[in-house]
Image: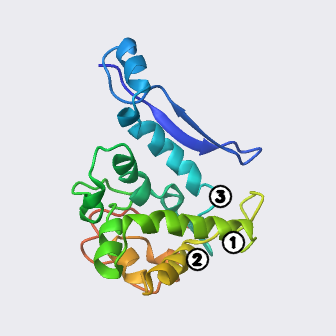
Amino acid sequence: MNSWGGHAYIYSGTRKAYTCTDGPGYYPTIEEKIQKAAQPEEQYFPLHEYMHTIFFGRISGKAGDFQDYYAEFFHDFVVPLPSYATGIVNPAEFCSYRNQAPSRGDYPLWLISELCKQNGFQLKDVALSLIELDKLVQSGGGQVELGFTHRVPTVVQYRDILNRLLGSDTTQAFADACWPPELFGNSYSLSDACSPITGSPTPLK
């Protein structure tokens, strides 16, 4: 079986996002890849990579001298959401998503589950929160200078958007989803459930 590859990143000179994929997924022949590429239900991987670009320039993983790029890739949303968009997973199961085999270093992808359980988060709130996040960017209200046209909002600013939308404090949901406390002013400590999963991001020099 041929391997599949894809990634999303930013041109360093222009700060423009781009994605690269060599097909819609894992298929044994180039003919099958071509056949599957036109089918809406086969678009998980292209959507996954595209969704990364939504967060580039809209979320910063920097807080003071601390930097964690996993926050900017936002896998908590980018991994599961294409499954609902392509019909792989029933949208009614949105709040039940919880990665059972998290990889070490990245966040365990528990944020959706925790936001649903603790704050009444729903699928519709994803779009609403991203609209508000983009409004914040376009208004110049971000706090981090990263070379984009506008300053980039912090994770705390995105949390505050969620707080307003959901009418409750979502900090504990981020904590229970193992997001680094350094992104939130060290206002909490990670639980023992996070210790075998999370890595140790290196502070900026």
* Coordinates of residue 96 in the picture (x, y in percent): 24, 63
Viewer-nearest residue: 70 or 122: 122
Amino acid type at mark 1: Gly
**Which label sits on residue 157?**
2
Quarter residue 139 falls in: bottom right
- From the viewer's perspective, is residue 17 above or below residue 112? above
Label 2: state its secondary structure: helix
Label 3: state its secondary structure: loop
Question: Could you tell me how far apart the alpha carbons at marks 3 and 1 are, in whole angstroms?
Answer: 10 Å
Amino acid type at mark 3: Gly
Instruction: Let me know if residue 204 appears in the view.
Output: no
* Coordinates of residue 129 in the picture (x, y in percent): 52, 69
Circle 1 sits on which residue?
142
Task: Name the N-terminal-most of marks 1 and 2.
Answer: 1
Circle 3 sits on which residue?
57
Residue in the image at 65% along x and 58% along y = 57
Q: Quadrant of the C terminus?
A: bottom right
| Residue contact at pointers 1 and 2, CB within 8 angstroms | yes
